[in-house]
Image (cartoon, rainbow, N blue to C red):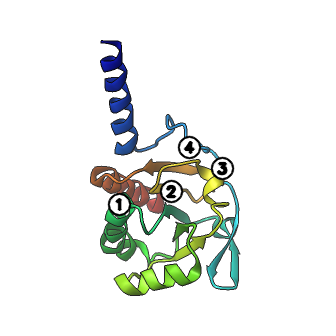
Amino acid sequence: MKRLTLCLVALVMAFSSMAGTANAESDAGTKVKTGAKAPDFRFEIAPNTPKYLSSYKGKVIVLNFFAIWCPPCRKEIPQISRELWPKYKDNPNFAMFMFGREHSWEALLDFKKRYEYDMNIVPDIDRSIFDKYATGQIPRNYVIGKDGKIFYQSQGFNLNEFKEMMEKIDEALKQ
């Protein structure tokens, strides 16, 4: 009986961790909390074109962490391409960067070309950017307000949470 109970508890924990939750502050893998200042970092917006996240202060920023091989990421990326990116890409108060965890420029450029994505997909080759925000589970989204603080975060992919994130972005852009 104890073994059965332990197995059931383990299964419940495994499924709940895979489901993903908005504002996932209870997730042990989250390093930054909603309301905290977003950690700054250096990255390349294009090969050999360095930028700092802090240079985008004053904009609503979406950071997405994914991997090409990740099944939930492969569901979320087309959604981003169809809904989120077209809606906000021309707004001067918006920026979005999708970080391919442990992927090179070559792999990401091939991925973008193969699926005809035009979003800002950039490498996080050594996970150093991801490691400032979390320790596990992708996809992950962090939405940063014009003040540089995180006001929304999610992990995993859930269509309802995705729509909630877009509503939060709309609200932030109106401020």
Q: Pointer 3: what residue? A: 37
Vertical arrangement, residue 127 with respect to residue 13, above or below = below
Q: Secondary structure at mark 2?
A: strand
Q: Residue at x 38, y 32 (%)?
A: 13
Q: Disc 2 marks which amino acid?
A: Val
Q: Pointer 4: what residue? A: 30
Q: Secondary structure at mark 4?
A: loop
Q: Residue at x 35, y 74 (%)?
A: 81
First in sequence: mark 3 vs mark 4: 4
Lateral position of residue 39 relative to residue 93, left or right? right
Q: Pointer 1: what residue? A: 71
Q: Residue at x 41, y 54 (%)?
A: 168
Residue 143: mark: 2
Q: Nearer the viewer, residue 14 or 171?
A: 14
Label 4 neighbour load within 10 Å: few <14, some 14-19, many 20+: many
Question: Residue 71 sits in which quadrant?
Answer: bottom left
Q: Secondary structure at mark 3?
A: loop
Q: Disc 3 marks which amino acid?
A: Lys
Label 1 neighbour load within 10 Å: few <14, some 14-19, many 20+: some
> Could you tell me how far apart the alpha carbons at marks 3 and 4 are, in whole angstroms?
14 Å
First in sequence: mark 4 vs mark 1: 4
Tags 4 and 1 in contact by the CB under 8 Å rule? no
Q: Nearer the viewer, residue 151 or 137?
A: 137
Lateral position of residue 134 relative to residue 8, left or right? right
User: Residue 174: x percent and y percent?
Assistant: 44, 61
Q: Disc 1 marks which amino acid?
A: Pro
